[in-house]
Amino acid sequence: MAIEHLIVLGIAIIIIAIGIRKARRVLKGSADGCDSGCCQSCGKNCPVKNLPNFSPQKSAPTPADTPPEPSPDNSPRHPPHLPLVALLLTTLAATLSGCISPSSPPLATRNHRSVLRNGVPVTVMLLDDNAYNRKYKLPGKMPQVTTITIHNTANDASARAERDYLNRRRDNKYISFHYAVDENGAIQIMRHDQHAWHAGDGRGNGNLKSIAIEICRSTCITHNAQLYTRAEENAVNLAAWLLKIHGLTTDDLRTHQDWSGKFCPHRILKEQRWQKFKQRVKKAMPL
């Protein structure tokens, strides 16, 4: 059981105990013979006290023991804390069963939500869960992440366009990746605990143990060249965050070429900037 659940359980038990204690006092007052729901000896708006020859049998209670005023219609009262107790019990049961979590759910379970990761806006838009995608794009679990692999898309499309194209591909090719990054941010396409088909090494460590980042706009060289520059900067910061959360270092960065020999990421390799890219990622690592 997570520590958050234990804290919720402890608080709920305390509040429930207080509610039950007060509810018993109210019920005891009703059982003493006062139809209005108050105790005969409360001395406050009690119809019994107003009868002739009434004399209290015990001293007035402290304010903490004074039950609530009767309802205007004198209808039977439910103990005031019972609805709260019921709500707490329902919430507690839902929390412990996993229907409600006291902490935010993991990023990859919150589809179409946006968060900021190391300065990069990341939108979760997971691939559709259908038979085709499960066969060709979502092959299985990745219990261990050992590297982060950098790719270039080799076109001028946006991250959203890359995600949507991948999602609707029906060419019977095994291909997928975790993130597409452009000048506006990143789109997460797969969960971190799912391996993708991106490295070209079959069932090697590239496909089975590495998170893939596709940097978009890589053919924007003269026209709209700043789009790729900004996309690469977002990829630097995203890669730094991924290394951090998985307990890795820049020594665990890889190119697509490292796995299968393909000249990718073509833009970074052609400009001979791979070592500089790694230095930028190291500098961007969160503390």
Image: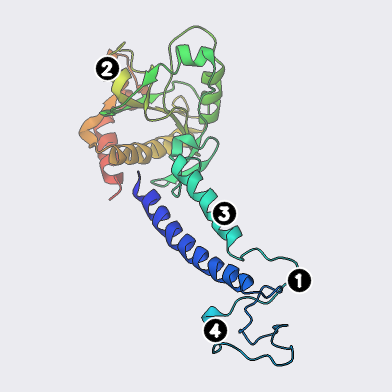
For label 2, the SS is helix
Badge 4 or badge 2: first in the primary sequence: 4
Which mark is nearer the camera, 4 or 3?
4
Q: Earlier in the sequence, mark 3 or mark 2?
A: 3
Q: Is residue 246 above or below residue 162?
A: below
Mark nearer the N terminus (4 vs 3):
4
Label 3 or label 1, whichever comes before in sequence order = 1
Identify the residue at horizontal 50%, vertical 28% (top origin): 126
Of the numbered discs 1 and 2, the one sitting upstream in the chain is 1
Callout in the foreground (1, 2): 1
Residue depth check, mark 3 versus mark 2: number of the one nearer the observer: 3
Q: Nearer the viewer, residue 33 or 66?
A: 33
**Residue drawn at 61 percent across, 84 percent down:** 42
Determine which of the numbered discs, if any, sits on residue 63 in the image: 4
**Spatial distance from mark 4 to mark 2, Cα to Cα?**
76 Å
Position above or below: 193 against 226? above
Distance, label 1 to label 2, CA atoms, is 80 Å
| Residue position marked by numbered label 2 in the rendering | 259
Q: CA distance from mark 4 to mark 3?
A: 27 Å
The residue type indicated by label 4 comes to Pro
